[in-house]
Image (cartoon, helix red, strand yellow):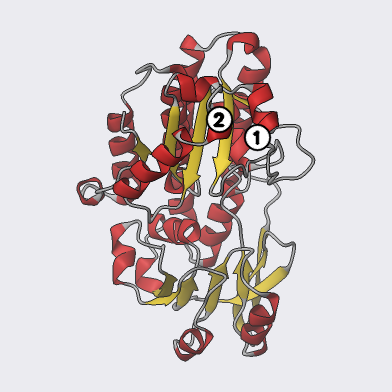
Amino acid sequence: MINRLLFILIIIIFLPVISMAGGKSEVETSVDKSLGNYITVKDYTGKELIIKQPVTRVISINSGLSEILGALECTDLMVGRDSFSTFPSSLKYVQAVAKNSSSPNMEMMLSLEPDLVIADLMFDKSKRKILENRGIPVIIESTSNPERLPFIVENFGKIFDKSDRANYIMSVLKDTLSIVGKGILEFEVEDKNKPIVYYENRKPYKSASGTTGHHQFIVLAGGINIAADEPVSSPKLNPEFIIDRNPDIIIRRVSGDITSDAMKVMLKSIYDRPSLQTVNAVINKKVYIVKSDLFISLRYPVGVAYLASLFYETDFIDINSLFKNYITAIYGNNEWSRIRETYVYPEQ
């Protein structure tokens, strides 16, 4: 219980870093009167980028990063996106120039003459070089780890002259995470009685170790990750290992574009696996399909609330109201009415 409480407090304390005056920032502003204004940014790869101000044409080919741009009210500056960048709904009106960061249409991207391209680690280094040789800076980021998120929001706030908005977004996120954390602590039990969780990441038997953001979400929600001590970040678990750990809950993570019908088929396929027939999660019908959208970016406090409700089978919080209030606070009064998704199957 103490370790769990400390972990929540560390996450919550860490989030306000963007608003701490005098604190170390990853963004520095420099002005050269002969050339104009520039922002110096260090991205996830550690590369320092010099970005000319103002940025008026941006391409984002990662849905989590596009979601942050939408929250910062920068959709009108976007001239290109990937096919998965459909939330918030305003992004749907931006031209698609890539399936994702690994499959961009470089000819189309170049024709749009962006001031900046934002992508994730799947973006090929040679393609990054092509853009940089044309004078187009490329930011590589990852939204899968909640500890990185404050820096991304801060950086984007500075780049797009939206620092006040960035501070507001992180304050809403922090407050929501605090509400969820306090709710979980009210019913959480000692470690020996916490639910044992097998987290399956996109492919059969592929999981996530303790070095990943996936693990942090499991811990924040009050679960024990069976793959926490695995030596690689995305281990493929042996069925015998899973049987030996005998998880109480199985969470299968899927991409955001999957339909509820496909989620239903996937659920059945997991229940039908011969290797899992003796596992408590299968015997007790505690297997759930969960969309990645809840965890890849700003919506993760709601994702943690969903996981906790699955782990403990309790309505410790009104998730629907929490979700609605969170979306409304960040994306405006009309966005909630446009959401038509099944995030968890079976629906709770």
Tell me where residue 197 appears, x and y as whole percent.
57, 27
Q: Is residue 65 left or right of residue 42?
A: left
Residue closest to the eye, 246 or 171 = 246
Disc ID at residue 276: 2
Q: Quadrant of the C terminus?
A: top left
Label 1 secondary element: helix
Residue closest to the eye, 294 or 163 = 294
Please say if the residues under marks 1 and 2 sit with CB atoms less than 8 Å apart: yes
* Amino acid identity at mark 1: Pro
* Amino acid identity at mark 2: Leu
Q: Which residue is mark 1?
A: 239
Label 2 secondary element: helix
Tell me where residue 268 appears, x and y as whole percent.
40, 38
What residue is shown at x 62% (from left), y 66% (from top)?
Answer: 122
Disc ID at residue 188: none
Q: Quadrant of the N terminus?
A: top right
